């Protein structure tokens, strides 16, 4: 198997003011991610997720350890060839429009396509940006900027996608659309590394999740291993009549999160209301998986 990302004993220390000790953001992380794998890097605020991504993309130098992409040290520009990267708050050149931004990406990555304008427009359409393709991005909402940055990353036909909180700032429809595009990218053999606070939308995207806490990689688990520990379930149904405990998601779509013990009552209410049941599945939340893991860790 080709190794897409290799991280060895990665350390990063940020200096603080003279009175405070330096901040140890990463305390020796080691990790290997294979080509074609989707890896979710999850953890609470300040755990070290963004720091890891900045080091992986060569935006910052580590204090210790090593990182390589497809066998090449990230310090070499060759390592970043074919890398699609979207930071948490993309800083787009706000005097350009989305079409220009995507075209510039193609040129910078040396990405050859038969009809560059058509190619870029296709990606803008997929991200719901075709109407604003020629509008400068100054004044775009956070969600629109995020979608532009994602379209830019996808348009260069990346062999590796590194995304910092890819769904933050998106509305529910945007999250669903982007999750679908990323799932397709993965199905077609792309390699994906993303961070997230919230697993709800991305739980099915990752083959493995790494839990990072206070700069240490605490565990790596598959979604099934994480879900197996969860006591909450998510229910979705389709219907017109309201059902107690359920909230409306879209046109006639309903959704509830509840404990397993309350599930049967809700299923009866759904049946009585004449709804069609779409889905019942364990709810995977970062909090529950994370708290469960930490409680096991403390008991060792
Ligand atoms: N430029 C910096 N200077 C000093 N300390 C920093 C800097 N960037 C991050 N840190 C510190 O490093 C630690 C890890 O931060 P990082 O942003 O990597 O966490 P994160 O997991 O991405 O958090 P979030 O989910 O809030 O984005 C935190 O304690 C943070 O305060």
Image: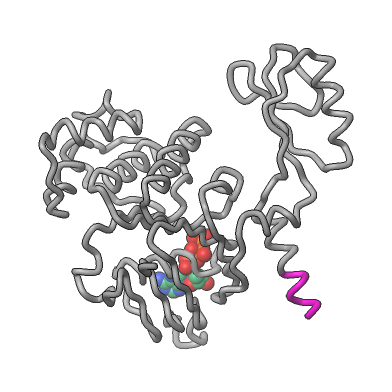
Q: In the image shown, does 46 or 155 lie closer to the viewer? A: 155
For residue 13, say whether it is visible: no
Depicted 12 relative to depicted 111: above or below: below
Q: Residue drawn at (68%, 62%), measured in percent from left and top?
A: 290
Q: Main secondary structure of the magenta part?
A: helix
Range drawn in magenta: 294-300
Q: Residue drawn at (51%, 62%), measured in percent from left and top?
A: 41
Q: Quadrant for the N terminus, please.
A: bottom left
Verify whether residue 239 appears in magenta.
Answer: no
Q: Quadrant for the C terminus, please.
A: bottom right
Q: Residue drawn at (66%, 54%), measured in percent from left and top?
A: 224
Q: Position of residue 275 (x, y in %)?
A: 74, 17
Q: Position of residue 60 (x, y in %)?
A: 32, 73
On the rendered structure, is 151 left or right of 39? left
- How many numbered marks does the figure carry? 0
On the rendered structure, is 25 left or right of 124? right
Q: Quadrant of residue 223?
A: bottom right
On the rendered structure, is 164 left or right of 232? left
Q: Position of residue 19 (x, y in %)?
A: 50, 87
For residue 251, say whether it is visible: yes
Q: Position of residue 231 (x, y in %)?
A: 80, 50
Verify whether residue 296 appears in magenta.
Answer: yes
Q: Residue drawn at (77%, 13%), measured in percent from left and top?
A: 274
Depicted 82 relative to depicted 117: above or below: below
């Amino acid at each position: 198997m080709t190794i897409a990302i290799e991280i060895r004993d990665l350390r990063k220390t940020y200096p603080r003011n003279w009175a405070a000790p330096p901040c140890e953001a990463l305390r020796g992380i080691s990790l290997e991610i294979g080509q074609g794998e989707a890896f979710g890097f999850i953890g609470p605020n300040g755990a070290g997720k963004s720091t890891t991504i900045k080091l992986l993309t060569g935006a910052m130098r580590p204090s210790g350890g090593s990182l390589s992409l497809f066998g090449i040290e990230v310090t070499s520009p060759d390592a970043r060839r074919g890398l699609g990267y979207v930071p948490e708050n993309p800083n787009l050149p706000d005097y350009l429009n989305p079409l220009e931004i995507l075209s510039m990406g193609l040129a910078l990555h040396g990405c050859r396509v038969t009809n560059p304008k058509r190619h870029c427009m296709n990606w803008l359409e997929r991200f719901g940006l075709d109407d604003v393709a020629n509008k400068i991005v100054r004044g775009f909402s956070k969600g629109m900027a995020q979608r532009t940055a994602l379209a830019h990353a996808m348009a260069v036909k990346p062999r590796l996608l590194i995304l910092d909180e890819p769904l933050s700032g998106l509305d529910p429809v945007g999250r669903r659309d982007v999750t679908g595009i990323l799932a397709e990218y993965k199905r077609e053999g792309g390699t994906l590394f993303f961070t997230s606070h919230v697993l709800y939308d991305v739980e099915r995207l990752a083959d493995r999740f790494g839990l990072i806490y206070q700069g240490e990689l605490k565990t790596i688990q598959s979604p099934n291993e994480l879900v197996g520990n969860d006591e909450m379930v998510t229910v979705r149904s389709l219907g017109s009549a309201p059902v107690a405990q359920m909230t409306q998601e879209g046109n006639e779509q309903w959704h509830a999160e509840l404990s397993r013990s309350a599930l049967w009552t809700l299923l009866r209410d759904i049946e009585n209301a004449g709804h069609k049941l779409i889905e019942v599945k364990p709810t995977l939340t970062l909090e529950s998986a994370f708290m469960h893991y930490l409680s096991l860790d403390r008991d060792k």
